[in-house]
Structures are given as structure tokens and as C-alpha cells.
């Protein structure tokens, strides 16, 4: 798999340069090694053994958000993000995890007080303790982001697992429409557990029995994207074993959803769980897609119309092709004045540890996003990914944009509850 | 030749540390353009952001006689920006500001690193229209397009980049900064130097910014697709429409090979048996568009079109054009080496050229895909081959040479819009008399006495 991803796939790049028009990183600074075309050429040469030595290779590999926008515009349908991940994995195989790990953990180690928190969390991640030296990637990204001075709410206790019973029945159990597993991911487990709870409440009120397997863990995508395939596989296997019999697996995290849908690709041929992973893919739903598909029982009761705009997480739009369901859900709410922002599909700039390792570029991408949000004069910007939420909250503060950042589940839940919201 | 420490340090002082790269890995991504066969490693890449920096870099390079290859987005199809002489690549992508959109006088002034698509999006907000549309518009820069003499489907009615240039700021090899031309619709002030720089492939001077004239966006548009069972017949239809005095904005052609790729990827319900499709776009005032559309439909039918489909609505029109642009990319991805020609003939001879290419395809046992801007006589026959397969590659080159000969014999030219660069140097000798080439060299010497700007391009080193 990897060999063809590293040779055949980039070999199909015809150097037309179209990806330049759609790449957020190239948009900030138009340098060839920052865009899919240049990276594909470097990877091809690396494979052929003709690339001169130089640290710019690894720098180029890291200079990608893996947002998937290049693939959307590529006439040759070259899957550049996957190629980049495979190339990172090849570097990790040769040089060990340390180079990528170092990048992520640099931020954390500088802020020792956070390590305590991290250690507490580590216990909850199946088979992975920070002491063993294996990274808690996705989690680590999130925590590192905190320590890199990005303004997000600190760890929100109680964590989601402590807020939820293992199984929640719908209010009228006789009318149960199905059984879903809720996959929280690190964002909703540890940082935005209130939002996680809101989603579970909507699912139960929509008539679903919600199972919350306590042994679920980090989705592993950050490890995978950093090229640390070994760790990512462990995480995937742990999750696959945690999922019980269900009709659907629902997640409110666009990034986790992408990971869950791709577990089949992560596991090697011959791995016993691969078949399970492949059949699981069809059952994975993004929260907004699921709720939109099955109908949302909300009864909006707001007095003052709220101006709302929506930001597309790259992992939802470009990796899963989910564009309309969240917008329809929002537009379906009464008393909402929905405005589309310019470039709603443009990346927020976080991209996991990219925000720390490439702070300047990340901030520049964020600035564009915040300017677009500010122009809408929206009260609320809704999105579907905790990573984006972090970056948008930080951006609102940094750029003094008076906008509240909400997860779509939180938004729907508020409307449904119809309480007086004091924002 | 390798750059001395002092030169590298001097460059870094001009552009700032961030404005220069020397890491060999970074050099590798400035070693190519969009052709499959040309490579050349630079020793330093600089990213100027101001005309003063360009000037200082040129003065330095001139003093030390270091080759400088200017680069836009590197989408050239002739090897133009490939730094075969080593030295410095001057990448213009950071000079990407639109300086002024003059909505009163219908002009725009922009730095050369602006991407054509970004310019179009900015102009659309003012309902203004800049017609030249090379199909690399998502990436290509204004400087690259000017320097390659680029144009696209709109060339039939609206012409090329060079037909819109009014003035420019350039930096000579010596480092001197000059304003050429101006911002008026007419300007006869000695030799037309801005025109000389159009298509000069970065061999005469560095263009820093350019002023173009603009049009108002046309009121109405209509797309028509005509399907033919015979490619030659399609070629005849092009000429028939043109000679009847109808002037569509675009007339594009794709052949059976492309039609099949389209149906494999994004089916549009095109008949797989069709030998060729012509796509027409009429634009202008609504009543005129309607009348021209009727004429085109009628003329295509009379020339034996199997079917003529006017696009029902804007979406269908868009689909037709997407299919056309897909054509180019389908060709690109489909062979290890691609010889993509750019011949142009008078429209009365298109059918002859097509017939000749079809014969070459058979006699040399090759796949030659036919597509292009048929409306202005400019075809891009694409020979699918593999440089590593000596026998195949030799046949491909024979066919390629025969296509050039045919185009010249029909009173045409060897390149309509991609330039000579490295790709067509050998053929230049056939297309231009020795005295002509000598004049080119004299002009080059007048601009760049030490020969540091993009050396080794256009004519063969002697
Ligand atoms: C998919 C595809 C479709 C294409 N379709 C068309 C088409 O329809 N019509 C058409 O005409 N062409 C087409 N082309 C080729 C066309 O020549 C280039 O796309 C475009 O003109 C080059 O722009 P660039 O910015 O990439 O320039 P580059 O490729 O970087 O450079 C081109 C030449 O210009 C010189 N140059 C660049 N900037 C400057 C400057 N500021 N001052 C002086 N010299 C400079 C370079 O030295 C080089 O010789 C296509 C190419 C591709 C890949
Ligand atoms: S758009 Fe695709 S084919 Fe074109 S340069 Fe980018 S990756 Fe290569
Ligand atoms: S995945 Fe995103 S950041 Fe990476 S090359 Fe593609 S468009 Fe650029």
C-alpha cells in the first residue's frame, strides 16, 4: 500500500499547479515546497533516491494541514494528503518517532503544570501511558495547543465519561428507533464535555438508545498523520474492540469521524480487525449528518432572532464530503438568521499540532477566517469539530470578534431546551 | 558554477533571510515546469517582494555574471522557467498585489505574481472582464502569461495577453528600473517595447508589474455542442463558421480519446462513437447571441454534424466546459512522457492538419490525442509516449517533427501560445530564417549584454 502511495500516486501528479489555487498554506506564502505539487515531486525523488539530502524535506512534509482541499481541485485526482501521511510514516520508520513527537511535545514540556493534567488523562487511554513513551497524539495535540498560548477553556471536569451513564434510553423507550454508539474523541471527552453531553441528549430525545463504551479512547488520527502508524494502529484496535453491537456510531468530531471511517486503511492486510474496521466504516456518521438524516425533534422557542454562520471543518467537507446537512439543520431552526460567510470552506488553520509547529502560518490562516466571520456580523459561529472550535475561540479573542463559538449539537440542544440564554 | 559565499550573503541582505533559499531540497522544487522532460537545478532561489529588490538582485548577478531565471508558477509547457544554466531562480509569486483597478478608465495594474484567477475574481466584483484565459488560470501568474504570449479559448474573438498590455515596469539585466508604455489605449512612442517583452520568455528583462486594458463583462452567453463522426469534418465546420463571418467567443475541440476519458470519469452522456466534439460559446448583446447561435447550429448541421446540442442552461454550459478543461488533464496523466504540440494554422487549413495528424498516428502506430483551441487554428496534438522506451520515443519524435513540417507547410507556426523554451529549439531553425534568429540574438544582446537572463532558451546554444 505504502509503496504505491509513495510512487504511483505522486507519479500521477502532472504538475499542472491547480492545487496552488486551493491550498491554505500556499495562500499565505506561495512557496513551492508548501504545496501539493512540490511535495509530490520531493516524495517521488526521495523514493527514487535522487533527492539531495537536506532538512527541507521533513520541513516540507510538515508544512501541510492535510486539509484535503488540493485533492478537491486536482484534475488527476491525486490524493496528496494521503501521500504526505505515507511519506511522514516512511520518515518515522527510518528515524523513529522522535522527530515528530518532539515537535508536539516541545510545547507541553515547556509547561510542566500541564503534565499533571495530562498524566491524569493518560490513565483513560487504553494501553497508552505517557510513561511508556508512546504519545497520546490527539490528546497531546490538544494539550499542546493549550500550552502554546492558544486561548481555549481548560480541561472541563467532570469529563464526559463521568457525566454519562453507559447506556441512555430515549424518554419513551417503547418508541426506540435504534441503538447508537457515541464516540466522543478527546475534544468532547476532556475539553468540551458539555457539548458532548448536549449531543447525547439530542440523540436520546430523537429516539435513540445511546451507548457510551467507557473503554473508547483517542481516535489516533494525530499519531497517524504524524506518521506514527504503530501507535495509531494500537488506538484503532482499542476502539474497534470497545464498540459493541449497534446500528450506528455517531461522533460530533469531524476529525474523529474521518479517522473512524478510514480505520480499514490503517490496519495492515491480514490483521484480524481489518474486516471489522471495513464494515464499521459504513456505520460511522457525523452527528450533523445523522441528525439531519433522521430528523430533529427541536421546537425552537427563541424570541430574539440570532444571526448564525457556519464554518466547514476540513475533515467534514473535504474528507467526508458532508456539506449540506449542517447547513440544512441550521436553516431549519426558526428565529435564526443564517448567513454564509465568505470562504466558509476555508481552513481555520489549526490542523492539530500544525498550530504549534507552524504558528505563524497557522495564525495567518486564522486571521483570514476571523475577518470573514467578522464581516457576517454573526452572533454565533457554528461548527462540528473541537479542533476548529479551539481555533475559532482563540481567534475571536485574538481578533476581538464578538462572536460565540458553538458546536452544532450545542446549538440544536439550546434551541430545543428553549431556555433563556444569557449570551 | 557555484555561487560564492559572498554572493549568497549579498542576496540574503537584499531579500532578507526569509526571501532566499539555498537548501538543495528546496532547489529541487524549482527545477521543473509542467513539461515531463526538462530539469535543471538552481543554486539559489530568491523571492523578491519589491521592484527595488529585483533591481539589486539583477545588479549583483550582472556584476558576477550569474544566470537568473525568472519564474512565475512554473506551469510553462516549453521548459521556459527551468534553470538549465543553474544560478539564481527569481520566483515572483510573492509579488502578488493588485495595485489598482481603475473602474473609470477600464484598466488594471497588478504585480506580476498575481495569479490570473485571483485577478479575474477581483475584477468580477466590478463586472469587469479580462478575456485572455490560458487554461492554467488557476495557477499561472500574469508575468508568466505575458512572457509566454499566453491566451486561451477566448482568443478567437478577444485575442491574447499581448493584446491587452498597455504598460509595464521592468528591470533590465543591469538592474535599471524602467517604465515602458503607459496606461492609454493608444501609444506610439518609438518601438513598442512592451510588445517585445510579450513572449520573450524571461530572456530580455524582468517584468515587475503590468497595466492591462479591460472590457465590461458580456451581457449574454450561449454554449453549443456539436458532435461529429469524423474529426476532419469537425475541422471543416470550424472554418465554415469563421468564413461565414460569425465570430464565436470560443471554439474548442476534443477528440474521441478525450470523449471516452470524460465518460469514464464524469459521464455527460456523450456518444462514445463520436470522433470529435466542437464547443462553441457565443457572447455579447442578447439578440446578437441568439442570432449567432442559430447560425452556428445551422452551419454545423450543414457540415455534417451528427448532433448539435445548445446548452439548456448555465449549469449544462458549465458541464460542457468542465469536460473541455478535463480533456487537458486527462491527457497529462496518461503517459510517462507527453509531447504536447502547440501548432497553429490558418483556419482554412485545420481540416488538412487534422487529416495529416491522423495519418501520422496510423503510420507510426501511436496515440495522438487531438484537442485545442480550434477556433483560432491552434491545436494541441498530444503524443502519448515514454522516454524510457527508445523505440516508441523515436517514433513519437518522428511524428512530432512531421507535425511541425505540416503546420509550416500549411502556412502556420510551430507554437501558438506555449513558447519555444527548450522544447522547440530545434524546430525554430525550420520556422525562422537564420537572419531572423540572428536578429533575436542582437535584440537579446541589446537588453542583456552579458547574457545572464534565462540563458540557453529559445535558440540552440552555438
Ligand atoms: C494545464 C495547463 C494548461 C495550459 N493551458 C494553456 C492555454 O490554454 N494557453 C496558453 O497560452 N498556455 C497554456 N499553458 C501554458 C502557459 O504557458 C502557462 O500556463 C503560463 O503562461 C505560464 O505562467 P507561469 O506563471 O506558470 O509562468 P512560468 O511557467 O513560471 O514561466 C514561463 C516563462 O515566463 C518567464 N517569466 C515568468 N515570469 C516572468 C516575469 N515576471 N518577467 C519575465 N519573465 C518571466 C519565465 O522565465 C519562463 O520563461 C497551460 C499549462 C498547463 C500546465
Ligand atoms: S492539482 Fe494535482 S496534478 Fe495538479 S499539480 Fe496539484 S497535485 Fe499535481
Ligand atoms: S492538504 Fe491542504 S495544506 Fe496540504 S497541500 Fe493539500 S491543500 Fe495544501
Image (cartoon, coloured by chain):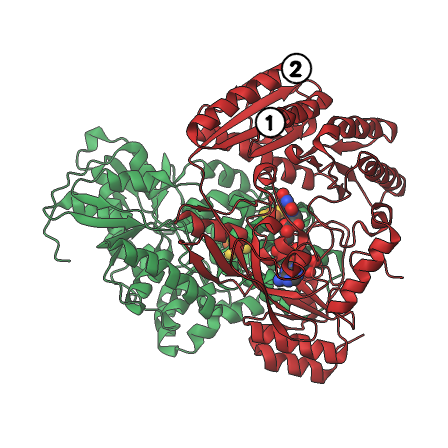
Chain colours: A green, B red
Image location of residue B229, percent across then percent down: 68, 17
**Do residues under tags 1 and 2 come within 8 Å of each other at their CB atoms?**
no
Q: Quadrant of the image for the C terminus of chain B?
A: bottom right
Left/right placement of residue A45 relative to residue B215 reads right
Looking at the image, which is closer to me, A64 or A353?
A: A64
Q: Is residue A39 visible?
A: no
Looking at the image, which is closer to me, A211 or A348?
A: A348
Please name the residue that numbered disc 1 is placed on: B245
Image location of residue B370, percent across then percent down: 71, 32
**To which chain does the residue with label 2 belong?**
B
Task: Name above or below for residue A217 compared with residue B6.
Answer: above
Whichever of callouts 1 and 2 sits on the residue coming sooner in the sequence is 1
Looking at the image, which is closer to me, B294 or B333?
A: B294
Cβ at disc 1 under 8 Å from ligand 1: no
Task: Say which mark, if any, is on residue B304.
Answer: 2
Give the secondary structure at mark 2.
loop
Looking at the image, which is closer to me, B180 or A289?
A: B180
Give the secondary structure at mark 1.
loop
Amino acid at each position: 500500500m505504502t509503496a504505491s502511495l509513495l510512487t504511483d500516486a505522486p507519479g500521477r501528479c502532472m504538475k499542472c499547479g491547480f492545487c496552488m489555487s486551493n491550498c491554505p498554506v500556499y495562500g499565505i506564502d506561495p512557496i513551492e515546497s508548501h504545496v501539493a505539487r512540490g511535495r509530490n515531486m520531493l516524495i517521488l525523488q526521495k523514493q527514487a533516491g535522487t533527492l539531495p539530502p537536506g532538512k527541507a524535506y521533513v520541513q516540507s512534509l510538515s508544512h501541510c494541514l492535510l486539509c484535503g482541499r488540493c485533492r478537491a481541485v486536482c484534475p488527476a485526482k491525486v490524493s496528496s494528503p494521503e501521500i504526505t501521511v505515507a511519506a511522514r510514516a516512511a520518515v518515522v520508520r527510518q528515524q523513529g518517532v522522535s522527530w515528530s513527537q518532539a515537535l508536539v511535545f516541545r510545547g507541553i514540556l515547556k509547561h510542566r503544570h500541564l503534565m499533571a493534567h495530562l498524566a491524569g488523562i493518560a490513565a483513560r487511554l487504553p494501553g497508552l501511558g505517557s510513561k511508556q513513551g508512546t504519545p497520546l497524539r490527539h490528546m497531546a495535540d490538544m494539550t499542546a495547543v493549550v500550552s502554546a498560548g492558544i486561548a481555549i477553556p481548560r480541561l472541563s471536569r467532570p469529563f464526559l465519561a463521568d457525566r454519562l451513564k453507559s447506556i441512555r434510553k430515549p424518554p419513551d423507550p417503547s418508541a426506540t428507533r435504534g441503538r447508537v454508539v457515541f464516540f466522543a474523541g478527546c475534544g468532547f471527552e476532556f475539553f468540551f464535555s458539555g457539548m458532548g453531553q448536549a449531543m447525547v441528549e439530542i440523540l436520546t430525545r430523537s429516539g435513540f438508545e445511546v451507548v457510551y463504551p467507557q473503554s473508547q479512547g483517542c481516535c489516533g488520527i494525530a499519531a497517524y498523520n504524524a506518521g506514527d502508524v504503530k501507535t495509531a494502529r494500537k488506538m484503532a484496535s482499542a476502539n474497534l474492540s470497545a464498540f459493541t453491537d449497534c446500528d450506528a456510531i455517531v461522533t460530533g468530531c469531524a476529525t474523529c469521524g474521518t479517522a473512524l471511517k478510514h480505520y480499514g486503511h490503517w490496519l495492515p492486510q491480514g490483521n484480524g480487525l481489518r474486516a471489522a474496521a471495513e464494515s464499521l466504516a459504513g456505520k460511522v456518521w457525523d452527528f450533523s449528518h445523522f441528525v439531519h438524516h433522521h430528523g430533529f425533534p427541536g421546537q425552537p422557542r427563541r424570541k430574539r432572532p440570532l444571526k448564525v454562520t457556519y464554518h466547514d471543518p476540513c475533515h467534514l467537507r473535504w474528507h467526508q464530503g458532508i456539506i449540506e446537512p449542517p447547513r440544512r439543520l441550521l436553516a431549519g431552526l426558526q428565529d435564526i438568521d443564517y448567513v454564509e460567510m465568505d470562504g466558509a470552506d476555508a481552513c481555520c488553520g489549526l490542523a492539530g499540532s500544525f498550530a504549534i509547529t507552524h504558528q505563524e502560518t497557522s495564525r495567518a490562516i486564522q486571521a483570514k477566517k476571523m475577518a470573514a466571520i467578522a464581516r457576517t456580523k454573526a452572533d454565533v459561529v457554528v461548527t462540528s469539530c473541537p479542533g476548529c472550535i479551539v481555533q475559532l475561540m482563540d481567534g475571536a479573542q485574538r481578533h476581538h470578534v464578538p462572536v460565540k463559538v458553538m458546536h452544532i449539537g450545542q446549538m440544536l440542544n439550546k434551541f430545543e431546551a428553549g431556555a433563556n440564554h444569557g449570551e | 558554477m557555484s555561487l560564492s559565499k559572498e554572493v549568497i550573503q549579498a542576496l540574503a541582505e537584499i531579500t532578507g533571510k526569509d526571501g532566499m533559499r539555498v537548501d538543495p531540497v528546496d532547489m529541487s522544487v524549482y527545477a521543473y515546469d509542467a513539461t515531463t522532460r526538462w530539469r535543471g537545478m538552481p543554486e539559489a532561489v530568491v523571492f523578491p517582494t519589491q521592484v527595488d529588490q529585483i533591481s539589486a538582485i539583477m545588479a549583483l548577478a550582472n556584476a558576477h555574471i550569474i544566470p537568473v531565471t525568472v519564474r512565475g508558477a512554473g506551469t510553462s509547457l516549453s521548459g521556459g522557467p527551468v534553470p538549465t544554466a543553474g544560478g539564481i531562480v527569481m520566483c515572483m509569486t510573492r509579488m502578488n498585489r493588485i495595485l489598482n483597478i481603475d473602474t473609470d478608465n477600464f484598466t488594471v495594474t497588478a504585480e506580476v505574481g498575481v495569479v490570473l484567477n485571483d485577478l479575474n475574481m477581483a475584477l468580477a466584483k466590478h463586472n469587469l472582464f479580462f478575456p485572455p484565459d490560458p487554461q492554467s488560470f488557476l495557477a499561472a501568474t500574469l508575468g508568466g502569461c505575458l512572457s509566454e504570449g499566453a491566451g486561451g479559448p477566448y482568443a478567437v474573438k478577444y485575442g491574447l495577453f499581448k493584446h491587452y498590455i498597455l504598460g509595464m515596469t521592468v528591470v533590465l539585466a543591469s538592474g535599471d528600473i524602467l517604465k515602458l508604455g503607459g496606461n492609454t489605449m493608444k501609444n506610439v512612442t518609438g518601438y513598442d517595447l512592451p510588445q517585445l517583452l510579450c513572449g520573450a520568455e524571461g530572456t530580455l528583462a524582468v517584468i515587475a508589474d503590468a497595466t492591462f486594458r479591460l472590457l465590461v463583462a458580456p451581457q449574454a452567453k450561449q454554449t453549443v455542442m456539436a458532435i461529429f463522426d469524423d474529426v476532419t469534418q469537425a475541422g471543416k465546420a470550424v472554418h465554415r463558421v469563421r468564413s461565414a463571418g460569425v465570430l464565436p467567443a470560443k471554439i474548442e475541440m476534443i477528440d474521441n480519446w478525450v470523449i471516452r476519458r470524460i465518460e469514464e470519469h464524469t459521464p455527460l452522456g456523450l456518444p462514445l462513437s463520436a470522433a470529435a466534439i466542437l464547443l462553441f460559446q457565443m457572447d455579447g448583446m442578447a439578440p446578437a447571441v441568439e442570432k449567432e447561435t442559430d447560425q452556428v447550429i445551422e452551419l454545423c448541421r450543414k457540415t455534417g454534424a451528427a448532433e448539435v446540442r445548445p446548452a439548456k442552461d448555465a449549469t449544462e454550459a458549465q458541464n460542457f466546459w468542465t469536460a473541455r478543461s478535463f480533456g487537458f488533464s486527462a491527457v497529462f496523466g496518461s503517459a510517462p512522457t507527453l509531447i504536447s504540440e502547440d501548432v497553429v494554422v490558418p483556419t482554412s487549413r485545420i481540416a488538412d492538419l487534422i487529416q495529416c495528424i491522423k495519418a501520422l498516428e496510423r503510420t507510426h502506430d501511436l496515440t495522438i490525442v487531438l484537442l485545442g483551441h480550434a477556433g483560432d487554428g491552434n491545436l494541441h496534438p498530444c503524443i502519448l509516449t515514454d522516454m524510457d522506451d527508445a523505440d516508441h520515443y523515436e517514433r513519437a519524435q518522428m511524428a512530432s517533427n512531421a507535425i511541425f513540417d505540416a503546420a509550416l507547410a500549411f502556412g502556420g507556426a510551430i507554437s501558438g501560445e506555449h513558447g519555444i523554451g527548450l522544447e522547440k529549439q530545434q524546430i525554430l531553425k525550420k520556422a525562422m530564417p537564420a537572419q531572423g534568429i540572428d536578429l533575436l540574438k542582437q535584440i537579446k544582446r541589446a537588453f542583456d549584454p552579458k547574457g545572464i537572463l534565462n540563458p540557453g532558451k529559445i535558440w540552440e546554444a552555438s
